[in-house]
Amino acid sequence: MRINGTVWNARDIAARIDHTVLAPDATRKDMENACVLARAYGFKAVFTNPYWTPLVAELLDGSGIAAGISAAFPLGSLSTDAKVAEVMDAVARVDGKPCAVDMVTNIALLKEGDFDDYTRDIAAVVKAVEGRGIIVKAILETSLLNAEEIRTACRCAAEAGVDFVKTSTGRAGAPALSHIRIMREALPAHVGIKFSGFGTLNAPELALWALFLGADVLGSPCGDVVVDVLSSGYAEVGMLAGS
């Protein structure tokens, strides 16, 4: 499959996917199954609720796949100190194994126009894990924001030092594909975009268009389906996005 002039195979697509298991009733067996899938497909990370982070890190040890830490999920309304404590507790429990942090930003601060505190809240988490090789993403919840708020949130997150800005948790509505272009225009080139929270309905098609529009990483609970469909079905029917 070709996207924006580049040929992608199944492993290329999988390496852009953060596989997610975030249901509150997810069990140990669900974690084990997710990690088996992640190893088989070569996903970028497996994101779970913090209770399961040490288990996921252990199951993925040696694979190079990160155990994802979902911080202040899904509301983002913890105090800054609580966010930092939650992240550092999870980091300590993975015991040096590869991990990554997706932190929900404090949307209320953004809506109130308190951009300095909004930025400081994000920066505190970035600083807490500095020097550990841990990727940090700031979740904006773009479905709750207008275009100018998305731009402002992106600028604040970039100033705070994040590696990626992420659209959504999926708990407050799905992101729009148009949000990707707004984000890309507002972000410096070194800050990536994660398109997530778009659900399972038409997930492969949404993932394809997200990559075409400039998303660098995808978050999905059905990463295996996305890879299988995009690497086989679309290639067979000759759907070449951007060609």
Image (cartoon, rainbow, N blue to C red):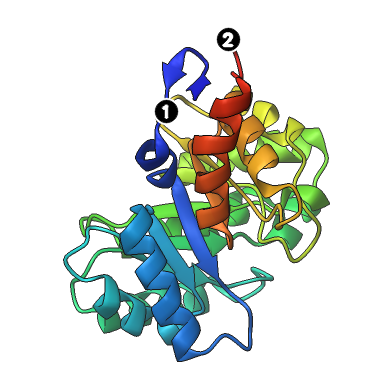
Mark 2 surroundings: few (<14), some (14-19) or many (≥20) residues within 10 A: few
Q: Which residue, given by chain and number where applicable, does mark 2 sit on? A: 243
190 over 146 or under it: above or below: above
Residue that appears at 75% across and 31% down = 178
Locate residue 157, reporting x and y percent.
Answer: 53, 45
Q: In the rendered structure, which amino acid carries the disc numbered 1?
A: Trp
Q: Position of residue 237 (x, y in %)?
A: 63, 25
- Position of 46 with respect to 39 (left or right) is right
State left or right for residue 139 relative to residue 145.
left
- Residue 46 in view: yes
- The residue singled out by tag 1 in the image is 8
Q: Which quadrant would the C terminus be assigned to in this image?
A: top right
In-front residue for pair 2/136: 2
Q: How far apart are marks 1 and 2 (CA)?
A: 13 Å
Instruction: Classify 10 Å Cα crowding around label 1: few (below 14), some (14-19), many (20 and above).
Output: some
Up/down of 192 relative to 40, above or below: above
The residue type indicated by label 2 comes to Ser
Image location (x, y in percent) of residue 185: 62, 22
Q: Tag 2, which secondary structure?
A: loop
Secondary element type, mark 1: loop
* Residue drawn at point x = 57 percent, y = 48 percent: 226
